[in-house]
């Protein structure tokens, strides 16, 4: 059983991910924008973060950048969710260790196995 | 209010500073490189310059203006609204304009710089910034949006293409929600039994149509990318058997609906292909979807995978209506739809095969068709094998392009 933070500005998407991950036996907390996600990560120290890229206040890439700049979260597994390919995001932060990517909509089992991979590498 | 100019051309740098100062901008900081500017403010990226710096004029020929640290730093600042950036670029240099757009520049000023134009651009950039600062940002995507705008105006992308691309992006999220929840329900029914066979069938229809819509949105988005010249692929080494198995998940519903069967035949010891996973899936979903759409019920489809020296070949054979020689000529053209009486009731956009061909070719592969009316069709495509596998089987010197890439 792992602690997972789900960050997405879409309430439906948040509850979908929560349902999915709770079904798989994890404990899930939710954040509705990048800034909240960032603060909750500091406070709750989740095992894995599942984060939308397009979010208000601070987007997923910016949150990731901050996380990778701090020793405590340097290696925190982060799974980025996008509705498109990340090919046009040229940021090298996407190459940082323990950073994964899942495209919406995903095939059955993809989110669960991304979480498992992220946990195994931790 | 302070303005920062970064320009490696010292003569131009001081001319711009003088012109701005004479127009009443009293705090103009001139730096000949990004490094100098950062040292001046004592920060490690442009995103962290003090909020008093309202505008940055950036010469994109400056060597360190291209480094990624600068880029991401600026994007971060553009989205929090501290500052706006204008790019200083050479006229008729689309690559530099694109660089400015990607870095988050709001607008570009082309050389040679005329004082009147410089001041006008400054006024409008600052007015836009004031307007933006007055409204709290609703989305955290400001930088990305303005990048896209800048890219569009630089490349003359049609308004329709842009609307299509935006609409498609927006469709993706609700689609992901629909197919995600439907899948959770179906999974639950698999474990605990469905309320009834009828409801199981209905829910499968919702899922099937979700997949269809997703495939359509993918094609429209790819179409927008093709039109704007921004189609990009990010290839990795992929196991074709595994990928085709995933793809099957998307089309299984369509196959079941028409009681069709699909046989997969793989050559032994097949090396991985070097392809973009999402694009590969899009290519196969399009071709399998077509095979299914243009075949009568109770027929079969065969997918056979073989390999040559450097390419994997996928042959997809159906026993459908077939394509006339006349239709084959324009088959891969945009909006072309076959003119076959038995296929006339089949709905479609005429985008699928056009997009598919572009995607295959973007990978360096080829696609072609062999078909007889009334007999069925075989669509064949090639995709490059992983470079690792190719270089193991043959000396690298034979392939200059591989040697250059390594």
Image: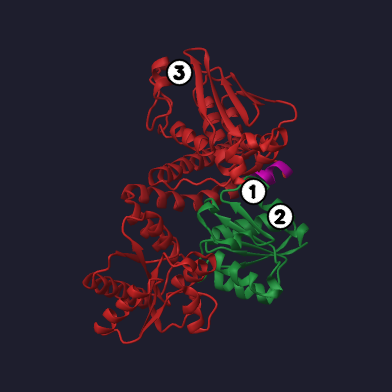
Chain colours: A green, B red
| Residue B63 x %, y % | 47, 66
Would you say B221 lies left or right of B238 here? left
Chain containing the residue with disc 1: B
* Residue bearing the label numbered 2: A23
Which tag is nearer the camera, tag 3 or tag 1? 3
Q: Is residue B238 above or below residue A103?
A: above
Residue B187 among magenta residues: yes
Query: Which labelled disc corresponds to residue B99?
Result: none
Q: B297 above or below B155?
A: above
Horizontal and vertical percent position of residue B257: 57, 28
Q: Is residue A57 magenta?
A: no
- The CA span between labels 2 and 3 is 47 Å
Asked if labels 2 and 1 touch by Cβ distance under 8 angstroms, the answer is yes
Residue A118, percent from left and from top: 72, 58
Marks 3 and 1 on same chain: yes
Write down the residue under mark 3: B323
Q: Chain of mark 3?
A: B
Q: What residue lies at 44% left-to-right and 82% top-to-bottom?
A: B51
Q: Residue at x 27, y 75 (%)?
A: B123
User: Is residue B203 visible from the viewing direction of this image?
Assistant: no
For label 3, the crowd category at 10 Å Cα-Cα, with few meaning under 14, some 14 to 19 and many 20 or more, is many
Distance from the alpha carbon under mark 1 to that under mark 2: 9 Å
* Circle nearer the viewer, 2 or 3: 3
Q: Residue at x 65, y 72 (%)?
A: A41
**Residue B287 appears in view:** yes
The chain identifier of the residue carrying mark 2 reads A
Is label 1 in a helix, a strand or a loop? helix
Residue A29 located left or right of residue B365: right
Q: Residues within 10 Å of mark 1 (few under 14, many from 20)?
A: some
Q: Name the residue beneath numbered marker 1.
A: B184
Magenta region? B186-191
Question: What is the quadrant of residue B138 in the picture?
Answer: bottom left
């Amino acid at each position: 059983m792992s602690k997972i933070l789900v960050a997405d500005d879409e309430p439906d998407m948040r509850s979908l991910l929560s349902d999915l991950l709770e079904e798989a036996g994890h404990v899930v907390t939710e954040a509705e924008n990048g800034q909240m996600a960032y603060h909750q990560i500091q406070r709750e120290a989740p095992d894995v973060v599942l984060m939308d890229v397009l979010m208000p206040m601070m987007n997923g890439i910016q949150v990731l950048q901050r996380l990778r700049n701090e020793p405590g979260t340097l290696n925190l597994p982060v799974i980025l969710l996008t509705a498109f390919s990340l090919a046009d995001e040229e940021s090298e932060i996407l190459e940082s260790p323990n950073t994964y990517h899942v495209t919406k909509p995903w095939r059955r089992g993809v989110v669960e196995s991304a979480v498992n991979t992220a946990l195994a590498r931790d | 209010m302070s303005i920062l100019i970064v320009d490696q051309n010292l003569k131009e740098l001081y001319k711009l500073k003088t012109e701005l100062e004479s127009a009443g901008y009293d705090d103009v900081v001139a730096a000949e490189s990004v490094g100098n500017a950062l040292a001046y403010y004592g920060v490690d990226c442009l995103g962290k310059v003090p909020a008093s710096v309202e505008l940055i004029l950036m010469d994109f020929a400056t060597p360190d203006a291209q480094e990624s640290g600068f880029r991401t730093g600026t994007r971060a600042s553009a989205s929090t609204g501290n500052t706006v950036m204008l790019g200083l670029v050479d006229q008729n240099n689309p690559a530099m304009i694109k660089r400015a757009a990607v870095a988050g520049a709001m607008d570009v000023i082309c050389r040679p710089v005329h004082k009147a134009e410089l001041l006008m651009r400054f006024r409008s950039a600052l007015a836009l910034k004031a307007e933006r600062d007055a409204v709290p940002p609703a989305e955290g995507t400001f930088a990305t949006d303005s990048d896209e705008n800048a890219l569009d105006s630089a490349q003359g992308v049609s308004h329709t293409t842009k609307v299509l691309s935006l609409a498609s992006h927006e469709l993706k999220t609700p689609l992901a929600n629909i197919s995600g929840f439907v899948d959770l329900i179906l999974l639950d029914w698999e474990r605990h039994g469905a309320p009834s066979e009828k409801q199981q069938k209905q829910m499968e229809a919702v899922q099937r149509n979700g997949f269809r819509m997703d495939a359509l949105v993918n094609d429209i988005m790819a179409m927008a990318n093709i039109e704007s010249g921004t189609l990009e692929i990010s290839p990795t080494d992929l196991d074709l058997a595994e990928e085709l198995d995933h793809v099957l998940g998307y089309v299984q519903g369509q196959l079941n609906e028409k009681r069709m069967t699909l046989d997969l035949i793989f050559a032994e010891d097949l090396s991985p292909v070097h392809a973009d996973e999402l694009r590969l899936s899009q290519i196969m979903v399009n071709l399998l979807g077509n095979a299914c759409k243009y075949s009568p019920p109770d027929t079969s489809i065969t997918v056979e995978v073989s390999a040559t020296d450097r390419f994997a070949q996928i042959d997809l054979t159906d026993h459908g209506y077939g394509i006339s020689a006349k239709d084959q000529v324009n088959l891969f053209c945009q909006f072309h739809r076959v003119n076959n009486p038995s296929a006339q009731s089949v709905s479609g956009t005429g985008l699928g095969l056009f997009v598919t061909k572009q995607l295959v070719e973007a990978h360096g592969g080829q696609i072609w068709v062999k078909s007889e009316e009334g007999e069925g069709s075989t669509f064949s495509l090639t995709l490059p094998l992983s470079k690792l596998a190719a270089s193991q089987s043959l000396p690298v010197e034979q392939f200059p392009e591989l040697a250059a890439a390594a």
